[in-house]
Amino acid sequence: MDDGDERHTLIRHTTRQFAGAKIRPVAVELDASERFPEDLYREMAETIQAHVLPALFRPYSATGWRERLYELLDRRVEVYEFIMPFRIAGEIRRFQSEYIANYAEQHLELERRSLEAVLPREKADDATLLHALLALSGFQAWCVLRLDLKLHVDARQ
């Protein structure tokens, strides 16, 4: 299998793995016209980080990189499900607040680094593959699957 075939197979499998998460509806009420108090956002961010960081940084049970990637995807589903209302509210307000914009950048950096950590060096150094996997396993992809496509899958494939 050449690098291109392996890359496409990995991307397809990552998409199926990520899409296989159970999806439940969440109602979020947002009023984009109101200013979101930054001190409230900071307090919420600290509370959320206290919940999600241990989930992201616990040791992997798998030893192979593919299995660790699947564990990472499972963890992201858990985290995204928990942070979705907060994150969507933040996305709406990120252009009103330097703090929220920085928080979003830090979250993306954490996603990238956690993905690089489970991939073998030659895969992590493949910018096309890394960016494709990051896009497929990122929060925006989760929102498309969860909210736009209203996917509900009982079992992972």
Image: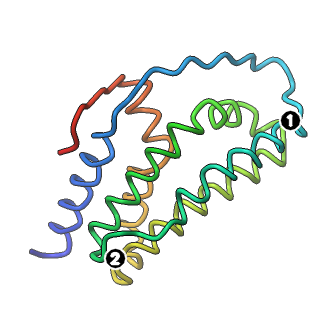
Q: Residue type at mark 1?
A: Leu
Q: In the image, what residue occupies the spot 20% across and 75% down?
A: 3
Check disc 1 and report its element: helix, strand or loop.
helix
The answer to whether residue 59 is above or below residue 48 is: below
Residue at the bottom extreme, as displayed: 121
Q: Residue 155 carries which label?
A: none
Task: Tell me where residue 129 appears, x and y as whole percent.
Answer: 35, 66
Q: Is residue 46 left or right of residue 140?
A: right
- Looking at the rendering, in which quadrant would you find the C terminus? top left
Q: In the image, what residue occupies the spot 63% across and 49% down?
A: 51
Task: Tell me where residue 9 appears, x and y as whole percent.
Answer: 18, 60
First along the sequence among labels 2 and 1 = 1
Choose between 14 and 46: the one closer to the eye: 46
The answer to whether residue 73 is above or below residue 39 is: below
Q: Name the residue under label 1.
A: 40
Task: Tell me where residue 67 appears, x and y as whole percent.
Answer: 27, 66
Mark 2 and mark 1 in contact? Answer it, CB < 8 Å. Answer: no
Q: Is residue 96 left or right of residue 63?
A: right
Task: Tell me where residue 155 appears, x and y as whole percent.
Answer: 21, 38
Real-space Cα distance between discs 2 and 1? 40 Å
Q: Residue type at mark 2?
A: Lys
Report crowding for label 2: few under 14, some 14 to 19, many 20 or more residues within 10 A (C-alpha). Answer: some
Q: In the image, what residue occupies the spot 57% across and 34% down?
A: 84
Check disc 2 and report its element: helix, strand or loop.
helix
Q: Residue 123 carries which label?
A: 2
Q: Is residue 104 left or right of residue 145?
A: right
Image quadrant assignment for residue 30: top right
Q: In this view, does 142 lie to the left or right of 2?
A: right
